[in-house]
Amino acid sequence: MDYESELLAVLSHEFYRATACNKKRTIETGRTFTQASFRNNVTKSEDIIALLGRQWRVHVAHLCRFTEIIEPHIGESYYNELFISCTAPLLRKICGCPKSVSNLIKLGIKIDLLCCTENNYFYGKGKKKNKCKAYIVNRCVASMLQELAVQYNITVSDYQKSSSSHNNITIPSCSSISCNLQKVRFRSSLRLPKEVTNNEVLQVLISRYSCLKHYMDLAQEINAKYYEQNERLKILFHPSIHRAKSGTITKIGIRASNAICGLPKHADEMHPYQTRGDFFSEYFGGAPVYEYDIKSSIYRVAYLLHSGEWLGEEVDFYSLMCLHEPRNKQEREEYKKLAMLLYFGGSVKNITARIIARCPHLLEKYSKESITETVKAAQEKMTAEIGRSMNTEIFLHESCLYMDLLQNLLSRGLKVVQIYDGFYSDDPRLPDLCRELLPCLARTYVGVATTD
């Protein structure tokens, strides 16, 4: 093995260790809470109506939907602690934006549905950690909300904001796009003026990516036809626009997901109660679950868009992209972490800086120049195999291709749950059907996809 390959193995190992050593806090499930933990003494539905004011019907509708979403994540006792993030996709769907989610949570606190127990909890890895708050959830008030909805015939659909606003979007011509909007695209590092509206962004995205509107419509069709009775499986597929506190647009992303994507394989700090396995048991009635997981999905789709060819699961992309063949499973696992940084990290300079920031001790043995040269060689090898990095745009194409696969499986009568690049069903035909359908669907998609 040459020097660069040896150094890449060292970088992979050290970066893997640095990103995996983050200690996590878990919910203390043994803690007990009572009604006295809450702000007001809400004991009957009339109290809720009085506290919510003139628009109580609208608020009850949204709060009922809110309780349905968090239901799988709380325990069975009357008072349970739960982490809630204002940026959770399903909560944003019923409210419109994180600020509206925050206002809904405030209403929950006002009627004793919620009580905040921790204001600033940071989770995740790296300097820019995710932030959320911890709350006690009051099942008694949740039950009262549901009773109110039944008593007064209140349904969420009567008050929920329409998710099909893109149907009325006017698509601008390329020549009419202003200078401020020329840089609108799916990227993780943008700097667009705060004056640019979300509606303008959506207009330009639909104009730039010809397949986007079709698949946004397809997501709604699948939801209406197959998942109407199961809100947690409904596909969320809409551009996500991130703004800094100043209002500047810093990131535009998209990836098809659903509420089940947020459930872990095993109980963790954010979801200590229900796991994916628990949901599968509930949804498939305890039947055996068959899985088809598309390995190295991002790189496989990138290769497809680069070459026009779909490579089957027998091809190991980590061996293909790495400077050397990983010598064992552990080395392969360590390279996987670094590969994400090589693909999404931007320039060689930025990637090198991030590695050294995480692993400063590397400079005791290796020069910054040698690390930079190794990163450059590793990124060039990756680019030669799968094409240039498409940044977050790759998730658009991954989502569209797999949505085609999902629709084909559902139309064949299979009961299917999709979690990003994984498909689950109680039908044993699932794995063979996926292997059979994907190459044909991939060839068709490449013919219609618009890449930036």
Image (cartoon, helix red, strand yellow):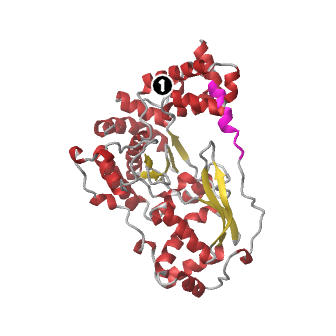
Range drawn in magenta: 11-23
The rendered magenta stretch, by its main secondary structure, is classed as: helix
Instruction: Name the spot of residue 75 as percent of width and height, x first.
Output: 68, 64
| Mark 1: few/some/many CA within 10 Å (<14, 14-19, 20+) | many
Which residue is depicted at the point 72% across and 45% down?
Answer: 23
Instruction: Name the spot of residue 283 as percent of width and height, x first.
Output: 55, 58
Q: Which residue is mark 1?
A: 382
Left or right of residue 427, residue 225 in this image: left
Instruction: Decide which of 208, 223 is in the foreground and name it.
Output: 208
Whether residue 404 is visible? yes
Q: Is residue 18 magenta?
A: yes
Left or right of residue 395, residue 451 in this image: left
Whether residue 310 is visible? no
Looking at the image, residue 1 lies above or below residue 45: above
Q: Is residue 80 magenta?
A: no
Instruction: Name the spot of residue 257 as percent of width and height, x first.
Output: 47, 51
Residue that lies at the very extreme toward the top in this rendered image: 2
